[in-house]
Image (cartoon, rainbow, N blue to C red):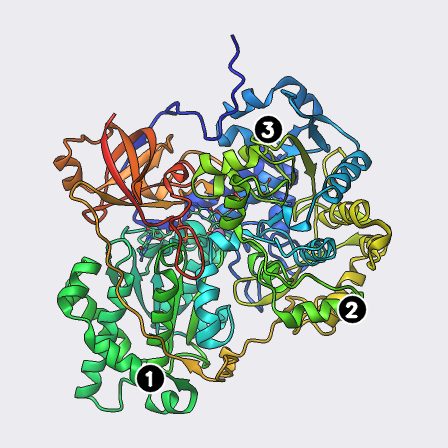
Amino acid sequence: MKDHTILTQPPETLTGLSVSKPSKIAAGLKAVIQSMEFAWSEGGVGRGTQALLKLNQKDGFDCSSCAWPDPDGHRSVAEFCENGAKATASDADTRRADPEFFSKHSLAELSRMTDRDLNNAGRLTHPLIRRPGATHYAPITWLEAFALIGRELNALASPDEALFYTSGKVPNEPAFLYQLFVRQFGTNNLPDCSNMCHESSGTALAPTLGLGKGSTTLHDIHEAEVILIMGQNPGTNHPRMLTALQIAKKKGAKIIAINPLHETGLDHFKNPQDFMNPIKAVGTLVGKGTPIADVFLQVKINGDMAVLKGIIKHLFALEEKHPGKVIDHRFIEEFTAGYEAFRINSRQDSWNEIEASSGLSRKEIEAAAELLAFKDKIVTCWAMGITQHKNGVDTIKEIVNMHLLKGAIGKIGAGTCPVRGHSNVQGDRTMGIWEKPEEKFLDALKKEYRFEPPRKHGLDTIDGVKAMHEGKLKVFVSMGGNLLSASSDTEFVAEGIRQLKLSVYVSTKLNRGHLTTGETALILPCYAHLDKDMQRSGQQFTSCENSMGVVSQSKGVLDPLEGEMLSEVAIISGMALATLGEKSTVDWVGYTENYDTIRDSIARIVPGFENFNEKIRKPGGFYLPNGPRHRQFNTSNGRANFSVTQIEAHELEKDQLVLMTIRSHDQFNTTIYDYNDRYRGVFGERRVIFMNTEDMAERNIKHEQLVNITSHFNGQQRRIERFIALSYDIPKGNTAAYYPEANPLVPIDSVAKESNTPTSKFVVVSIEAA
Ligand SMILES: Nc1nc2c(c(=O)[nH]1)N[C@H]1C(S)=C(S)[C@@H](COP(=O)(O)OP(=O)(O)OC[C@H]3O[C@@H](n4cnc5c(=O)[nH]c(N)nc54)[C@H](O)[C@@H]3O)O[C@H]1N2
Ligand SMILES: Nc1nc2c(c(=O)[nH]1)N[C@H]1C(S)=C(S)[C@@H](COP(=O)(O)OP(=O)(O)OC[C@H]3O[C@@H](n4cnc5c(=O)[nH]c(N)nc54)[C@H](O)[C@@H]3O)O[C@H]1N2
Ligand SMILES: [Mo]
């Protein structure tokens, strides 16, 4: 008898682990070889190389991997990294997940494939429908698909019964049209992946510095004297950042890395781009590479607040010894508010508490503070190891406190640098993808399009999932992404999605999220960044905003595979026309025929985009306005605000450990390219849990033994089984496993204060032999 259940998680079969010592050097020759192998195997030699040569070039397309900026001036021939090459190869795939493929495999069968095999099915080529009760996806015409969406949306009792999710690869032009469609339909239910990602950064930066984005440019990183890298694994997730760090190091910068793991890229780096340059190639890829971190603080998970408090405490102490040399009193006086309360609060923290919470010695923390004490060109970079915590917002406010104390903001070589994830996640927010839009933005929409936008705030990702679970939502539309696997609490999400009347996925490639569906489901295939987008007025380009607020062009270079894919702009316009019909005041057809007309509208609505069409045609694009960069703090009191924060106390029971869910080297979020976490020395397997050797001994668990993991939250338990325990250099009491395999453990209610971001880096678990 065939099993017709649709699995919501990857199959539990083990794929063949082999382990070696973690790598000491990031990138280097191996990275070059890996890039080429991926490009040639999936895209074919011609297509793969053609695409790679245009990746991140001024006349090319924006890498759909991370949001690290491209250099403003000269760009190397190979302006990409190994992982950008994997993402490109995956999009350039010549394999086709076409209707024939779907006729051969039921949803239940597909759900038994690994995530890698689902991605390897190839590019989605035709619109597909899963009709109520059907076992398979079947083809449907675009017209029928749009009409169905229109019918279901218009049948809702309220527009708030629909949820419109966005993943951060969607470029500015489609993102703008998407939010416009959704708001004309009548709701602000516009959650995005940012809610699970850097939401804590925006939430902390807006009230303190007056802008929910970072303040540094690439040039600032090059010019910095000290760079802190907190809760980030650049070697894997932002490899081109290592090039910037290498430049800074060569100019004498000191680097402080704060991480529970000795991540390879934080240690040594060999620039693979040197390999592409024949003069530099000789001798650069052999040898040790550039050492990166000068001080490495192997902090306990969530010990960062304590580290920052320790650093600040020591800065105050050094200021007493060297009055006027450590703290920038002039800056504080002229630009900030709340200093006194902050200063008094900073005195409260005892070294005992700081050491206990951080797992570090006072001496180690003081050594870091001493690197900072007499410098003011300081940049702090951070990512998910900081944001995905209950107190993520406060920890970022403490980072801001440190910068304000040193006057290390709004000058060359200094600033805050939240390192973003998806290539256009920052731009999507700028374009209005936000469940809590600003009134000013809505007013501008109203003026341009003569309609009354909804003012009531909508649902973010976690509240959206909860509303689904409560049966309050009927339609779910997903512009890219994979909410099922990316959200916390996989089973909880699945239960919600199954109650929907209609789920719609606009996607480039097949993922597990397409398999757990509402009563009816649609997959709508779209172009990727690298596909040529031909419309009535000729080839179109779009634009993306990188992590440092630079907006640049992205123009596809490959002929799309044979099939019926449409651009995201065309798909959104199709949905809007079918749903809004005559009611809409927007020229959806005109917008689709020529994206310049979308940009003309954006130019009238979004500050910083004036003369958009002209500026975007300049090679390299343009910078968006950034107050903090110029010491203009657009907060409620017009000043940069110090905050009063506390160290978070975590009460764990005796046998409990803390689990962080992290990315391996061979994945992009829920897209799994392969099974090798090369830098950490883990090959062939993702169902692993990294453990401290003493914690293993206490539990009688041997290296490579199978274990079951249970998470604990408010008396609830969640469980995943058959993971391989690996003895690894990680602080005692801490463990790590890969996202998304470990997501069923993350409790839906365990979220960061204020930002509502899942605490994906702090899951309380117990572990026992399987
Ligand atoms: N190749 C590749 N590139 C990517 C992605 C990808 O999946 N693959 N994803 C993209 C996206 S959307 C994002 S948001 C970024 C994510 O980029 P990262 O934030 O670098 O990704 P994570 O793997 O989540 O790693 C978090 C890092 O924080 C550390 N960490 C965990 N908890 C703590 C803590 O409490 N304190 C400190 N100090 N460190 C901690 C972990 O050891 C790990 O090194 O990367 C983007 N780029
Ligand atoms: N436990 C745990 N959970 C996490 C995290 C964690 O660290 N730990 N990280 C969180 C973070 S930082 C993020 S950003 C989220 C990511 O959450 P999502 O953004 O929802 O997930 P992705 O895996 O990036 O989405 C991949 C899918 O997007 C589609 N896609 C790719 N390119 C395009 C495109 O150009 N256009 C369109 N329309 N579709 C495209 C493809 O179909 C692909 O399968 O996950 C979060 N979840
Ligand atoms: Mo992210």
- From the viewer's side, name the closer residue of 228 and 159: 159
**Measured along the vertical axis of the image, is residue 331 above or below residue 704?**
below
- From the viewer's side, name the closer residue of 291 and 88: 88
Label 2 neighbour load within 10 Å: few <14, some 14-19, many 20+: some
Q: Residue at x 74, y 73 (%)?
A: 611
Q: How many marks?
A: 3
Q: In this figure, which residue is indicated by the disc labeled 1? A: 339
Q: Tell me the amino acid under the disc marked 2.
A: Glu
Q: Nearer the viewer, mark 2 or mark 3?
A: 2
> Is label 1 in a helix, a strand or a loop?
helix
Q: Residue furthest front?
A: 157
Q: Tell me the amino acid under the disc marked 3.
A: Ala
> In screen coordinates, is 465 left or right of 763?
right
Q: In this figure, which residue is indicated by the disc labeled 3? A: 121
> Is label 3 in a helix, a strand or a loop?
loop
- Residue 289 in the image, given as x and y percentages of width and height: 34, 55
Q: Tell me the amino acid under the disc marked 1.
A: Tyr
- From the viewer's side, name the closer residue of 680 and 170: 170
Label 3 neighbour load within 10 Å: few <14, some 14-19, many 20+: many
Q: In this figure, which residue is indicated by the disc labeled 2? A: 448
Give the distance between the C-alpha atoms of the residues marked 1 and 2, in whole angstroms: 43 Å
**Measured along the vertical axis of the image, is residue 493 above or below residue 456?**
above
Q: Nearer the viewer, mark 3 or mark 1?
A: 1
- Res 540 visible: yes
Give the distance between the C-alpha atoms of the residues marked 3 and 1, in whole angstroms: 57 Å
Q: Residue at x 41, y 43 (%)?
A: 665
| Quadrant location, the C terminus | top left
Give the distance between the C-alpha atoms of the residues marked 2 and 3, in whole angstroms: 43 Å
- Residue 54 in the image, given as x and y percentages of width and height: 64, 52
Q: Residue furthest top?
A: 1
